[in-house]
Image (tube, helix red, strand yellow):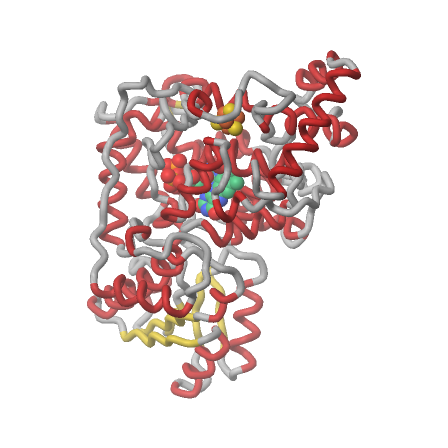
């Protein structure tokens, strides 16, 4: 039996391989011409594929590894050598991919059996049974799903109750580190000959792509052993403080206590169960506190699985939704990082440097600004998609289009929109910024402030009635005409400056 292993299923332990003797892998290059993907991302994907090929061969599998322009070309080459072969494929999470691959194989005289993708903790059937009669129109709520999965998988449970008595220690995830704090070290992985060769190919072929083209940007695991060591390092060095500083941002610090495991999980190098089990073990042995371990578990079994299923249920509509009718172009600062706004300049430079920014920079800086500025959510989605090392359509789209842009209310009942106050509370960015966070209007006022109020006003019809926006609109109602005039003027000025690259 031949297993066709895709570039985001890179585990020699993947279930279908247990009964296979032959593996097909296709390294397709032309897809990467479609968007100017970060060179670190392309290097990591192709290098991880080649390392997985070698690991499979060492285990005794016969591996056909085709380098081709497209999957179609790769399949042509494969079926010319092995006519009529039957392939087994783990169900790819991105919308429509399985059906497309099935048709491509059949037209070349082969057959394709699509089986469960074992790189996740929950199956589509489990989610659909949990959702019952709820549809995309009703929306899905992560907290309810999270509790259900904790019970189903028996993670951090004390009998029928959650460990420690609470399901969620979110209120203990909001500290900011004191000024003398320095973050724990980040693991490093020396690029080997394969990674160097791939990097040379990537930077020559895709020489006009966005993002730092240096090999220094490739700080991400490319083998299963590296991914396992990244997990061990996280659990011993950074997990203990992960909970406290999960929502914090610090000038000059890109990683803080985050796990940096998303690229490994999304490539299939690491199974989410391993990540969860390691974190829970650290709690059980007294090496990490509950607010950290629960916080991490919530991200992996709660959010990651939830996003996969909501995406599956909400596509293809999610690829086009735009409930707030936002249509502005992404301002140039997302491409060149040129801005006096410390928060945005930091976050964009982190993405540029290594294809990564942590969750709060993604949500409360990069997508928050785009949301209140009025950027077309699908343009923002493309930017995230090409810029991040962990970006795949199934996970980037619900995060950017749903969570970040509120272009649909399928996964949250209110937008993640905030003024500069939130950033000031959760970071040390504002103290050294050219803009004044305590001011909303006039020259030098923090751009987030006027945009935030203007956004609430512009979208009043859509937002006033939605759950949990009442408090915000009570502040809107208190502002008089004169204040609104100044806010509008400042918001107009901020948008114009951003458009012209002068913010
Ligand atoms: C606008 C926006 C875009 C995002 N784009 C992506 C993306 O392209 N790919 C991606 O994997 N994640 C994405 N996320 C989710 C999250 O920000 C990243 O998974 C996380 O920052 C990765 O860094 P980490 O591994 O250090 O995560 P940690 O903070 O250490 O969290 C642990 C793990 O939890 C999982 N996780 C946490 N939150 C989410 C979430 N909302 N959705 C899915 N998984 C989650 C990830 O696998 C992550 O590795 C996005 C979030 C936002 C708000
Ligand atoms: S003052 Fe405003 S623009 Fe400057 S760092 Fe703070 S939130 Fe960002």
The image position of residue 131, as x and y in percent, is 60, 39
Q: Is residue 181 above or below residue 119?
A: above
Q: Nearer the viewer, residue 374 or 20?
A: 374
For residue 97, what is the image quadrant?
Answer: bottom right
- The reply, left or right, for residue 383 in relation to residue 255 is right
For residue 247, what is the image quadrant?
Answer: top left
Task: Let me know if residue 201 appears in the view.
Answer: yes
Q: Nearer the viewer, residue 207 or 415?
A: 207
Q: Nearer the viewer, residue 23 or 6?
A: 6
- The reply, left or right, for residue 183 in relation to residue 426 is left
Task: Let me know if residue 122 appears in the view.
Answer: no
* Screen quadrant of the C terminus: top right
Q: Residue at x 53, y 43 (%)?
A: 333
- The reply, left or right, for residue 167 in relation to residue 213 is right
Q: Is residue 204 above or below residue 442?
A: below
Exactly how many numbered labels are in the figure? 0
Q: Residue at x 57, y 44 (%)?
A: 398
* Screen quadrant of the N terminus: bottom left
Q: Residue at x 50, y 67 (%)?
A: 33
Q: Nearer the viewer, residue 372 or 117?
A: 372
The image position of residue 122, as x and y in percent, is 46, 45
The image position of residue 360, as x and y in percent, is 46, 32
Q: Residue at x 37, y 25 (%)?
A: 245
């Amino acid at each position: 039996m031949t297993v066709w292993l895709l570039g985001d299923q890179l585990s020699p332990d993947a279930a279908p391989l247990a009964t296979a003797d032959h593996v097909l892998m296709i390294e397709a290059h032309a897809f990467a011409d479609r968007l100017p993907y970060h060179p670190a991302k392309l290097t990591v994907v192709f290098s991880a594929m080649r390392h997985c090929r070698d690991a499979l061969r060492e285990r005794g599998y016969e591996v056909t590894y085709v380098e081709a322009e497209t999957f179609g070309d790769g399949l042509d080459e494969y079926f010319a050598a092995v006519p009529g072969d039957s392939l087994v494929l783990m169900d790819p999470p991105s919308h429509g991919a399985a059906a497309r691959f099935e048709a491509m194989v059949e037209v070349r005289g082969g057959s394709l059996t699509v089986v469960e993708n074992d790189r996740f903790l929950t199956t589509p059937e489990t989610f659909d049974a949990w959702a019952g009669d709820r549809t995309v129109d009703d929306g899905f709520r992560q907290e309810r799903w999270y509790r259900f999965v904790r019970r189903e998988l028996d993670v951090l449970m004390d009998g029928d109750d959650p460990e420690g008595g609470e399901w969620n220690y979110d209120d203990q995830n909001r500290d900011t580190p004191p000024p003398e704090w320095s973050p724990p070290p980040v693991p490093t992985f020396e690029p080997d000959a394969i990674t160097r060769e791939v990097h040379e190919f990537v930077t020559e072929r895709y020489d006009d792509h966005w993002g730092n083209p240096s090999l220094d940007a490739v700080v991400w695991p490319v083998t299963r052993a590296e991914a396992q060591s990244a997990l061990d390092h996280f659990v011993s060095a950074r997990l203990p403080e992960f909970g406290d500083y999960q929502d914090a941002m610090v000038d000059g610090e890109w990683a803080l206590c985050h796990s940096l495991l998303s690229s490994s999980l999304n490539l299939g190098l690491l199974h989410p169960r391993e990540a969860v089990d390691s974190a829970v073990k650290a709690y059980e042995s007294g090496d990490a506190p509950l607010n950290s371990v629960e916080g991490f578990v919530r991200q992996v079994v709660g959010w990651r699985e939830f996003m996969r299923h909501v995406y599956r249920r909400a596509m293809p509509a999610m690829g086009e939704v735009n409930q707030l009718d936002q249509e502005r172009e992404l301002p140039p600062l997302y491409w060149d990082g040129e801005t006096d706004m410390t928060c945005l300049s930091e976050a964009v430079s982190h993405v540029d440097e290594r294809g990564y920014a942590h969750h709060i920079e993604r949500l409360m800086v990069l997508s928050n600004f785009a949301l209140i500025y009025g950027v077309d959510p699908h343009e923002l989605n493309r930017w995230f998609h090409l810029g991040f090392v962990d970006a795949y359509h199934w996970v980037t789209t619900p995060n950017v289009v749903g969570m970040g842009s509120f272009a649909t209310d399928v996964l949250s009942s209110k937008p993640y929109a905030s003024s500069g106050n939130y950033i000031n509370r959760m970071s040390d960015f504002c103290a050294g910024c050219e803009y004044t966070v305590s001011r909303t209007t006039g020259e030098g006022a923090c751009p987030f402030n006027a945009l935030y109020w203007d956004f609430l006003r512009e979208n009043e019809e859509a937002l006033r009635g939605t759950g949990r926006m009442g408090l915000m609109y009570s502040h809107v109602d208190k502002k008089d005409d004169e204040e609104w005039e100044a806010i509008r003027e400042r918001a107009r000025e901020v948008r114009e400056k951003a458009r012209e690259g002068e913010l």
